[in-house]
Amino acid sequence: MTDHYNYVYISQLNEFTCNLCASSHGGIFTAETAPKLPRHHHCRCRLQQVPADVWQPGHVDWSKVDPAFTMFWAEWVADRLRGGAEIPDAYLPLVPLAEEINE
């Protein structure tokens, strides 16, 4: 196991989520680049600590991610596909699973 961590930005996505927080959802940050939370008065976001050898900005080794956490992100990718939104590079390997979810 690693003793070095990065952070993945997790927003509570719903009609109350601001654009700043929604656009940061899924972002992968180092300790040096992670935004300071809360970002505003009603912010409900969090930074999830993740192993840096698995989660890098722009890349995730999905074979090493807990299946439940993988499914959480696959459902987000599925939602983005339904809405025609861009899929960040780190999440592109989840597109086949997301397409299955959307069937």
Image (tube, rainbow, N blue to C red):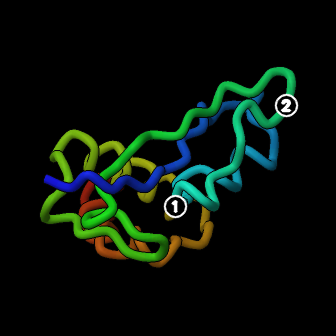
Query: Where residue 45 sits in the image (x, y, percent)?
Result: 63, 32
Q: Secondary structure at mark 2?
A: loop
From where the camera sits, is residue 69 visible?
yes
Query: Where residue 92 sits in the image (x, y, percent)?
Result: 38, 75
Q: Secondary structure at mark 1?
A: loop
Report the residue at 25% width, 62% height from top: 97
N-terminal label among 1 and 2: 1
Nearer the observer, 4 or 72 = 4
Q: Which residue is mark 1?
A: 30
Q: Is residue 8 left or right of residue 68?
A: right
Query: Where residue 94 sits in the image (x, y, percent)?
Result: 30, 66
Pointer 1 local density, CA inside 10 Å: few below 14, some 14–19, many at least 20: some
Q: Kindly check if marks 1 and 2 are in contact, taking CB atoms under 8 A apart as contact.
A: no
Location of residue 87 with respect to 18 vertically, above or below: below
Nearer the observer, 34 or 4 = 4
Q: Is residue 2 left or right of residue 27?
A: left
Pointer 2 local density, CA inside 10 Å: few below 14, some 14–19, many at least 20: few
Q: Amino acid at mark 1?
A: Thr
Report the residue at 52% width, 72% height from top: 88
Q: Amino acid at mark 2?
A: His
Report the residue at 37% width, 51% height from top: 73
